[in-house]
Image (cartoon, helix red, strand yellow):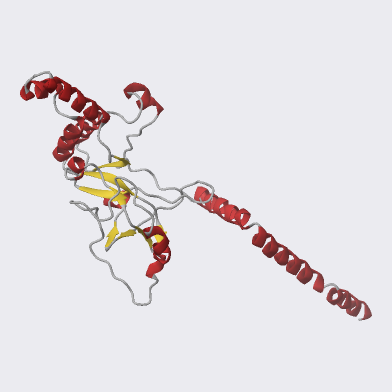
Amino acid sequence: MATTTTVRTRRHRHAWRPLLIGTVTLTALFVFNYYHPAAFDLADLKASDLRMYVTRRPPLTGAVVIAAIDEKSIAELGHWPWPRSVEARLNDALRDYKAAVVGYDVLFSERDEDDVQAERIAARLKGLGIADAAVEQTLGTGNDLAFADAVKRQGSTFLGYAFEKHFDLSSAPQILSAPVPTGFKTSPVAPPPLAYNLVRELPDAAPKLLIAARAYLPPRPVLNSAARGTGYVDYDADSDGVLRSEIAVIRFGKRYCVPLYLAL
């Protein structure tokens, strides 16, 4: 009986040690997190990666195919950006393959460089007295127009666009006071970007936390009007530069815009 009592007394005597160790450890973690929060953020991101890697992935269906702008294609077709006659041929090929839907996650916001050069050549030829019909026959159809015609023929092609920058509505005054970059539009051009057709705003929601934008860079008008629709290709990478999530909605004026991946 005396031996049992002695053992219990020793156990109670050292019971505070785990509590002390736990308290000191937690305090050290809180202090370290206060001075070095990025380290814990990075650890949390890497833990998220591990959880993703150990999850069994579903088998690929083959329904989605990516035509990539990679080293091989650049070696064959030349440096990027390619003449849009290349995209025109690609779209015609995809139509022949009976692709259900086509999407371009690149921006076509500026004129095709070959079209710009052809316009300069046309001006010189006309200055030499050559008839307009002869000039047009010599230079042929512009690349932008050829691509637009191919997009119309396919009938279900979506193009991408980019917003100027993202902000939450609480910081809007500082963002809205800055000048708008050249080419960006503060209101939708026709046809406007795709948007959700049904939105319900709850009275107790916090709309100021929603991602918003004040201007966007649409495709060239001839391409914008030829496409079935346009969706944004914006994304926000994590602090380590890795893309782990997609932005599902961005408010632009009174529109709640749809990303390209959901449009497809």
Residue 260: percent from left, percent from top = 30, 49
Looking at the image, residue 9 sits to the left or right of residue 127; the answer is: right
Quarter of the rendering occupied by the N terminus: bottom right
Residue 179: percent from left, percent from top = 36, 52
Identity of the residue drawn at 29% across and 45% down: 183
The front one of 252 and 67 is: 252
Asked whether residue 216 is in view, the answer is yes
Identity of the residue drawn at 25% across and 28% down: 86
Residue 151: percent from left, percent from top = 18, 38
Looking at the image, residue 235 sits to the left or right of residue 96; the answer is: right
Q: How many badges with numbers are in the image? A: 0
Identity of the residue drawn at 54% across and 48% down: 240
Asked whether residue 264 is in view, the answer is no
Residue 49: percent from left, percent from top = 53, 50
Looking at the image, residue 165 sits to the left or right of residue 112; the answer is: right
The front one of 47 and 115 is: 115
Residue 170 in the image: above or below residue 98? below
The front one of 123 and 135 is: 123
- The residue lying furthest to the right in this view is 2
Residue 14 in the image: above or below residue 55? below
The quarter of the displayed image where residue 13 is located? bottom right
